[in-house]
């Protein structure tokens, strides 16, 4: 029951009550001068009996005098208030702190009657009739869960409410142990919400303020509103009191698989359909509903707008009889002395109608005991039931396969990880929501997006991929591969050509152009236009079309080997640790060159350095320490010089010379000889 103020509650009971009405349509307010009438229909059951796990949208039918264009799905909220025009100070016997009245005494607070959205409209003369439903209809969309399963019913319930932007109150009680094992495929959000409510002995509805609520049914619930004989016009009992002591839950309608709990005949059995049910869920339903009973009836009464579907109400009925009319035994007769008998029932269907005043009709239907025990099927019913068993139904899932008018044959996993759609315009395999393998009708091609794996097979034509991993043996007579070709091992025969890519494993024979090759063994192959590195960084050797390059641990270039076509030379260039060139060795047209950019040291740490052939010094030479016998022809020149000097010297004078030092002047081409004391002993012109 929706909460109202004490003043509102008291004035509803007055025989002279007078309603004031308004409606908020979008952002505009319509008063009673433009509201012709309206009716509101609320239900927890649309069958002939009691149900749980329902989610039935409430319906508003309202007539407005308006020339304004009200858009589709416009929000309409009707309100009711009670006029206080005749209230006097002596009649206002209410606690002061509970009153919220204006000095004008116009009326009580406004009671909302629900939040509705325009679905259909019709105009007769200047009056528009709008048919509206509450926001439960907005949940009639496919539920594609993004959760990881299995998960709890509470988590699924929250995901749906968050997507819809709905709020719910404390009436929503979900057992924390109840779980859903796999993603619900083929169900709408409203169906999933209803199944969760069903597992927790409840139905769902939207209250008058637009909040999602559970109506939880229990055997021990007391009335929330009591009606006297003055509050209703007629009441008609349609069946004896209905009581439930047994619960049967069908969790697989195709194979008729069920759980059950409790004992009782068909008349005392509650049947529930819930694909999320378990034996524990069924036992929980019996624990809550065992002994639940209500009086089946129909009633026409004064309107009490605070009542909601699912409310348990009590009412009085005059059933006095005379002593002569009483035929029961004394001990079995239970008649109050005032002749008024009190009953309890539940509102399963109600309709509020306003046309200046407010009236309501209530229903609590039930199936008779005879119909519960003996269901007689006519010939047409028998054929329909047989057809239901044998025929495939549109939109119904058979182990994940569904046939619809819009998409044809659909095969989908419960967790939505994969789906296949087959019709005349589409042949598609989906991975989640993405296409994995499909026929592209405009381009007349089959397309694949994912990993292609086969034990063996033959591919003819061009196999082209932006990227991918190939395991096993890939054999081709020819073809062009674009993107990344990767394999742990395998044999490639023919020509393997790629603009780029990474090859892993062993490449035997064949021809590979472009890309990067990573492997421990390459045999008999031509590698063209590639870059080869012994390591990705640090100490390494790299080979590319420009030549060889050697790097140190600091990634500095130390030695290069290559050609310079413009200079028509080839050779080595040497660099220091900073990457600056220090010298080079290269071959010219007819000579070999050894050049140091700063200095050049030629020598041996042991043994001797031999310079074969004619040696020509184009600059000064210093630091030489040579023996006479090491210079070709020098000993003969010295001997001749000695002979000339010896003829001029004193006969008694002797001079011994065992070693000389020498310097050479390239400008004058003079060779000067010095003795061991550093004194010049001779100058020889070598020009």
Image (cartoon, grey):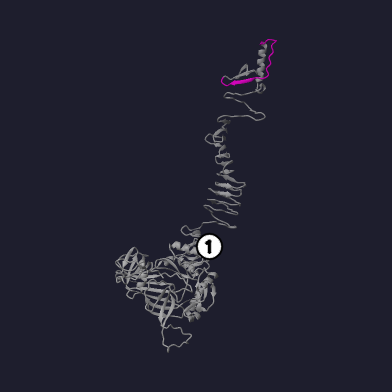
Q: In which quarter of the image is residue 236?
A: bottom left
| Figure disc tally | 1
Residue 461 is at least partly visible in this image: yes
SS of the residue under disc 1: loop
Compared with 321, 105 (above or below) is above
Q: Which residue lies furthest to the bottom in this view?
A: 324
Q: In which quarter of the image is residue 595?
A: top right
Instruction: Give 47 or 2, whichever is nearer the viewer.
Output: 2
* Quarter of the image with the N terminus in it: bottom left
Residue 264 horizontal/vertical position (percent) = 53, 78
Instruction: Give 582 or 159, whichever is nearer the viewer.
Output: 159
Instruction: Give 141 or 654, whichever is nearer the viewer.
Output: 141
Compared with 159, 614 (above or below) is above
Residue that label 1 marks: 149
On the picture, is 496 further left or further right than 424?
Answer: right
Q: In which quarter of the image is residue 96?
A: bottom left
Instruction: Give 109 or 503, whichever is nearer the viewer.
Output: 109
On the picture, is 115 further left or further right than 663?
Answer: left
Magenta residues, start to end:
648-667
* Crowd rating for badge 1 (residues with CA inside 10 Å; few <14, some 14–19, many 20+): some
Q: Predominant secondary structure in magenta? A: loop
Residue 216 horizontal/vertical position (percent) = 47, 70
């Amino acid at each position: 029951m929706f909460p109202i103020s004490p003043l509102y509650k008291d004035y509803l009971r007055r025989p002279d009550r007078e309603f004031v009405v308004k409606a908020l349509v979008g952002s505009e307010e319509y008063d009673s001068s433009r509201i012709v009438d309206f009716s509101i229909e609320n239900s927890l059951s649309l069958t002939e009996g009691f149900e749980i796990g329902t989610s039935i949208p409430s319906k508003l039918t309202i007539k407005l005098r308006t020339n304004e264009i009200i858009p589709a799905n416009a929000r309409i909220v009707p309100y009711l208030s009670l006029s206080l025009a005749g209230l006097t100070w002596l009649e206002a016997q209410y606690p002061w702190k509970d009153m919220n009245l204006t000095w004008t005494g116009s009326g009580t607070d406004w009671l909302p009657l629900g939040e509705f959205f325009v679905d259909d409209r019709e105009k007769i003369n200047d009056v528009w009739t709008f048919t509206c439903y509450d926001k439960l209809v907005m949940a009639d969309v496919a539920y594609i869960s993004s959760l990881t399963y299995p998960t709890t019913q509470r988590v699924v319930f929250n995901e749906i409410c968050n997507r819809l932007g709905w709020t719910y109150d404390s009436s929503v009680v979900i057992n924390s142990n109840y779980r859903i094992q796999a993603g619900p495929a083929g169900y709408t959000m409203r169906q999933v919400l209803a199944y969760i409510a069903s597992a927790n002995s409840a139905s769902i509805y939207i209250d008058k303020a637009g909040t999602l609520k559970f109506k939880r049914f229990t055997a021990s619930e007391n009335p929330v509103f009591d009606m006297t004989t003055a509050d209703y016009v007629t009441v008609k009992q349609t069946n004896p009191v209905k009581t439930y002591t047994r619960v049967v839950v069908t969790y697989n309608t195709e194979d008729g698989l069920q759980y059950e709990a409790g004992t009782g005949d068909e008349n005392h059995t509650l049947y529930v359909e819930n694909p999320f049910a378990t034996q524990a869920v069924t036992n929980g339903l019996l624990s809550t509903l065992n002994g639940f009973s209500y009086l089946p009836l129909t009633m026409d009464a004064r309107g009490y707008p605070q009542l909601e579907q699912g409310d348990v109400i009590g009412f009085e009925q005059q059933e006095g009889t005379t002593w002569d009319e009483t035929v029961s035994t004394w001990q079995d007769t239970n008649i109050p002395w005032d002749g008024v008998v009190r009953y309890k029932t539940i509102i399963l269907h109600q309709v509020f109608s306003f046309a200046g005043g407010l009236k309501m009709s209530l229903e609590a239907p039930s199936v008779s005991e005879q119909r519960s025990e003996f269901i007689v099927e006519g010939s047409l019913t028998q054929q329909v039931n047989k057809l239901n068993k044998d025929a495939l139904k549109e939109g119904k899932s058979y182990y994940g396969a569904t046939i619809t008018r819009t998409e044809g044959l659909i095969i989908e996993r419960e967790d939505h990880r994969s789906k296949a759609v087959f019709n005349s315009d589409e042949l598609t395999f989906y991975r989640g929501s993405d296409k994995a393998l499909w026929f592209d009708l405009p381009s007349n091609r089959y397309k694949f997006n994912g990993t292609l794996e086969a034990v063996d097979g033959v591919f003819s034509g061009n196999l082209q991929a932006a990227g991918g991993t190939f395991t096993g043996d890939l054999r081709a007579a020819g073809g062009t591969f674009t993107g990344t070709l990767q394999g742990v091992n395998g044999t490639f025969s023919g020509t393997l050509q790629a603009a780029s890519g990474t090859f892993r494993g062993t490449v035997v024979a064949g021809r590979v152009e472009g890309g990067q090759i990573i492997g421990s063994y390459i045999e008999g192959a031509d590698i063209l236009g590639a870059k080869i590195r012994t390591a990705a960084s640090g100490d390494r050797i790299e080979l590319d079309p420009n030549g060889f390059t050697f790097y140190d641990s600091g990634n500095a270039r130390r030695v290069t080997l290559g050609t310079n076509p413009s200079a028509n030379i080839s050779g080595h260039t040497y660099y220091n640790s900073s990457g600056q060139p220090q010298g080079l060795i290269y071959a010219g047209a007819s000579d070999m060159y050894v050049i140091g950019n700063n200095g050049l040291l030629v020598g041996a740490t042991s043994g001797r350095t031999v310079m074969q052939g004619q040696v020509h010094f184009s600059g000064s030479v210093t630091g030489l320490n040579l023996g006479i016998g090491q210079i070709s022809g020098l000993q003969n020149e010295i001997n001749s010089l000695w002979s000339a000097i010896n003829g001029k010297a004193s006969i008694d004078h002797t001079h011994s010379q065992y070693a000389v030092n020498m310097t050479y002047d390239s400008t004058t081409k003079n060779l000067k000889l010095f003795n061991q004391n550093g004194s010049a002993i001779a100058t020889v012109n070598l020009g």
